[in-house]
Amino acid sequence: MGGMNLAFWPQHLSRHLELPATSLWYNLEVSATRYPDRAAVVYYDRILSYAELRWSAERLAGYLQRHCGVQRGERVALFMHNCPQFIIAYYAILRAEGMVVPINCMSTASELTHIVRDCGARTLIASQQLVPHAQSLGDVLRHTIVACYSDYLPDTSDLTPPDFIAVPRSPLHDGQIAWGEALDANFAPQPHVAGPDDLCVMPYTSGTTGKPKGCIHSHRSVMHTAVGIARWHEGKSIECVLTLLPMFHVTGMQGSMNTPLFLGITMVLMSRWDREVAAKLIQRYRVNSWTTVPTVIVDLLSSPDLDRYDLSSLRSIGGGGAAMPRAVAARLQEKCSLTYVEGYGLSETMAPSHINPPARPKPQCLGIPIFDTDSRVVDPQTLAELPVGEVGEIITRGPQVFAGYWNQPEANRECFIDLDGETFFRTGDLGYVDAEGYFFFVDRLKRMINLAGFKVWPAEVEAQLYAHPAIQEIVIIASPDERRGETVKAVAILRPDARGQVTAEQLREWARQHMASYKVPRLWEFVETLPKSATGKILWRVLQEQERRNQPRDRPGAASTATS
């Protein structure tokens, strides 16, 4: 595969992964049949068995089919924080032959509206905290099922859930259906007929226009990384995982939900990060494995009470979203005798296309291509494959690569290329391969900002900020951040009457009301002029390069760096 170096491929694994010839739903059916009494989900000490999880998903699936009229391949929107209802709803949609459209729980009403209208969903499953965002979708949505997080909390526990999780059930508005009512209808679903090539899930990712685009995945592409993650870490004796990363995002969806369900192991679920609660959960339920981002590890290790907890059950920890700082990795090794194993993937590849070999990981490294995956580094202009150590665009092909963007024929033409008789996906990420076949990330060919795994499209943020009356001109760039990998920075010219009157904090507060919180610029720089081309176009690349020169970040050495 493109001269790929396989010297450090895990010795116990075949390069080829034989997948189950079934839908993803069947994984839950098998696990629930094998281990009906085993804890599937632990939610702040509330335990849901595999039998209960399957029963709830089947009842909700029957309601989706018989009351909501969900048909094979129909998109159903899912809008929740991490909670047992998210897992139940996700698998209920699959059992009903539908396609899950998971939506970022930090999305604003306008962002939700775009996604629901774009995918054509007629049914929404949402939490009572988030359902008000759907008020403008009355002409599109025919059915809205509303869940209350606190319904799945235990009667007593010494664990403190987030305040928004503990809120009791509130009255519903006309046309809304209570979660309990849907399950209590006790509708049995029709026979399940979906197979590997049916539509499965469509996560949305920002694209070149700044508008989110749906990534079309079949049961086969989702199954590939769900099973692949399990196989990659064979021999670790994993029985219990900490599910913290948001399950609407492909990393949390695969590593912390779909893979554990395939294995029939226990998911200890958190709705929001709390280092003391996490430490208690790891100790109490003997958590073995944890997929997370470096910022969370940084916070955990900074706890003055860390030594009070027994974290010795942890045998595997890893993730992605941003490179793990070397100093933090060293402290993790010192405190917990654990090596953070990094991986790399996108919504378009349903999480990992690359993972570090567990027996020989490299720091701040994407890893090597996983099963049946061919990745290369090419010149972004000529598409010629580049030699070892030279920086170019990472391209990938494999069973996990998506089928394309929903209703985006132009974007599909741009993101797929033919090379050596095969079709590759252009990731838009710049990187290089070292002499041992490990891939390293360098920069983005596109303008995307990667904030601890969440991706921010600058053009979208700029467009929203231009609506503020004090903004004359603005450009959004990425600023290196030790904890998040990158953070969002705004470089702005204020209108004359606003100069000295409007502060950065006022602009941040305004932005929080108009966009998801992770998109809000944390850093602001007010300037008199912005660099522009002869045609008047703002030269954002100039500002981006200046920012990186002012705040450089280390990366492992490469033989050379190509300019593009």
Image: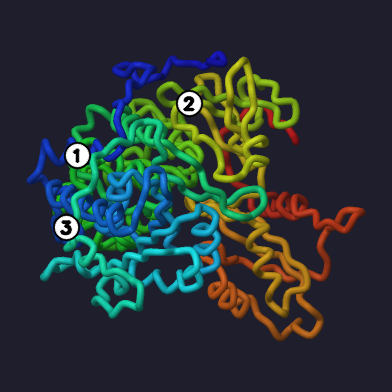
Residue 284 image-quadrant placement: bottom left
Identify the secondary structure beneath mark 1: helix
Q: Assess disc 1: are there few (<14), some (14-19) or many (≥20) residues with their C-alpha within 10 Å of its C-alpha.
A: many
Query: On screen, 20 above or below 404?
Result: above
Give whichever of 556, 175 is nearer the camera.
175
> In percent of the image, x 61 and y 16: which residue is there?
421
> In percent of the image, x 56 and y 37: which residue is there?
441
> In percent of the image, x 42 and y 26: which residue is there?
370
Estimate the spatial distance between the alpha carbons at disc 2 and disc 1, rounded to whole Å. Answer: 27 Å
Residue 236 image-quadrant placement: top left
Identify the secondary structure beneath mark 2: loop
Residue 168 image-quadrant placement: bottom left
Q: Nearer the viewer, mark 2 or mark 1?
A: 1
Identify the secondary structure beneath mark 3: loop
Estimate the spatial distance between the alpha carbons at disc 2 and disc 3, rounded to whole Å. Answer: 40 Å
The residue indicated by pointer 1 is: 29
Seen from this angle, which residue lies furthest right? 534
The residue indicated by pointer 2 is: 398
Give whichever of 476, 65 is nearer the camera.
65
- Residue 186 is tagged as 3
- Residue 259 is left or right of residue 544, and the answer is left
The image shows residue 401 at horizontal and vertical percentages of 49, 32
Q: Assess disc 3: are there few (<14), some (14-19) or many (≥20) residues with their C-alpha within 10 Å of its C-alpha.
A: some
- Residue 292 is left or right of residue 380, and the answer is left
The image shows residue 184 at horizontal and vertical percentages of 17, 63
Give whichever of 399, 93 is nearer the camera.
93
First of labels 2, 3 by sequence position: 3
The image shows residue 530 at horizontal and vertical percentages of 81, 62
- The answer to whether one can see residue 282 in this image is no
Seen from this angle, which residue lies furthest left? 37
